[in-house]
Amino acid sequence: MRLIFTSLVSHGHLYPLLPLAVAARDAGHEVLFATGDDMLPVVEKAGLAAESAGFGMREAFESFFGPDAQPRAKDAPPESFYPVIGQVFGNVLPRRFVADLAPVLERHRPDLVVYESGNAGGAIAARLAGIPAIGHGFGRVSPGEVADIITGRLAEFAAEVGIEGASLPSFGDPVIDICPESVQAPDFLAEANRIPLRPVGWAEPGDLPAGVAGRDRSRPLIYLTLGTAFGDEDVLKRAIGGLARIDADVIVAAGPTVDPAALGDVPGNVRVEAWVPQVDLLPHVDLVVHHGGSGTTLGAFGAGLPQLVLPQGADQFTNAEAVVTAGVGTQLIGADIVEDAISEQARKLLTDEAVLGAARKLADEVAAMPSPAEVAQRLPEFAG
């Protein structure tokens, strides 16, 4: 069977699809991955054929708002930027992906398109080409005002290209869901044709920081990251300052948006890395302090780890709320993200038996979800 996977052009949207894409290839299917140029090397390192389609989020915002989109977004109240977000994710990005995917679909004529849920252009392009399609989530569904605005703009664009009356944003297609049911949004569970898939983390090959493997587990290890898109130098400095007070070792992944050198000299129990293979690191960790990105949140769920979430934007706030509701961690927001609070909350999470028990229970739920290999065997069901 011929399959085309497609995602938005970011690590957080691409990585969740790679385990299933690789499993489908290993099952003997012909797999092509279509995404933007910036992510093609990642796909190729996974051993998958790739073609260029779409463009990155920064380019999308700049095409609508001009090159100063990011500064304006930071300086203005968040809600004032919602219409722009709606236009970019509900029109600009889908429009570009539809245009780029149309010739790809025509050339390859796949039996099934697997589109990442944020990439509605993949769904629309498949529908226009008359090709069956299924969605693939990248984490917990985050309902709210922003999602409603995006859906509204998407409905307008879909109608413009001749698709009306479809159930948005999944167009009524089945959706592969990598979020454990107990923490998934109730409205999504009630409405979606859901195909559970165990969230298997993905990381480019790399070595763990020296001393992690085989370390003395009597001394806690804390992992601090703000992810690949929302890195903030000031927040990282405050978090480092708070965590360094604890009798523990701290590994910081600065990510692509923060220069490790900008963090300056750090205490002796803190190590700053530009990047770490998160999938390989999590089994060695005792606490994750992070931004609430879907990949890190789900990775911590699967590893049975307590979480201190410092949400910075996008769906991170609803992910943080889900962490708190599930009893597997706490959150600090905005002005509460200070050294004293970070230190206090981290200390509690390392020893709170109720939180640790809830985290272990959630990890058991994740482990019981179907594997990528199992879901790959089901893909022919959806090819029509």
Image (spheres, helix red, strand yellow):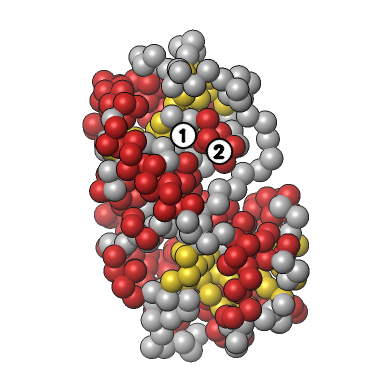
Residue at x-position 73% and y-position 49%:
45
Q: How many marks?
A: 2
Q: Relative to 360, say whether 98 is above or below.
A: below
- Residue type beneath disc 2: Gln
Instruction: Report which quarter residue 304 is drawn in.
Output: top left
Mark 1 crowdedness (10 Å alpha carbons): few <14, some 14-19, many ≥20: many
Mark 2: secondary structure: helix
Residues 99 and 27: in front is: 27
Q: Residue 373's x, y, as percent?
A: 63, 62
* 52 to the left or right of 340: right
CA gap, disc 2 and disc 1: 10 Å
In front: 381, or 148?
A: 381
Question: Residue 134, image x and y in percent?
Answer: 53, 75
Residue receiving disc 1: 225
Q: Residue at x 47, y 65 (%)?
A: 196
Residue 278: give its label: 2
30 versus 220 height, above or below:
below
Tell whether 26 sits left or right of 373.
Answer: right
Q: Residue at x 32, y 43 (%)?
A: 358
**Closer-to-camera residue (254/137):** 137
**Residue 232 appears in view:** no
10 Å crowding of disc 2: few (<14), some (14-19), many (20+): many
Q: Are marks 2 and 1 in contact (CB under 8 Å)?
A: yes
Sequence-first disc among 2 and 1: 1
Tag 1's secondary structure? strand
The amino acid at mark 1 is: Thr
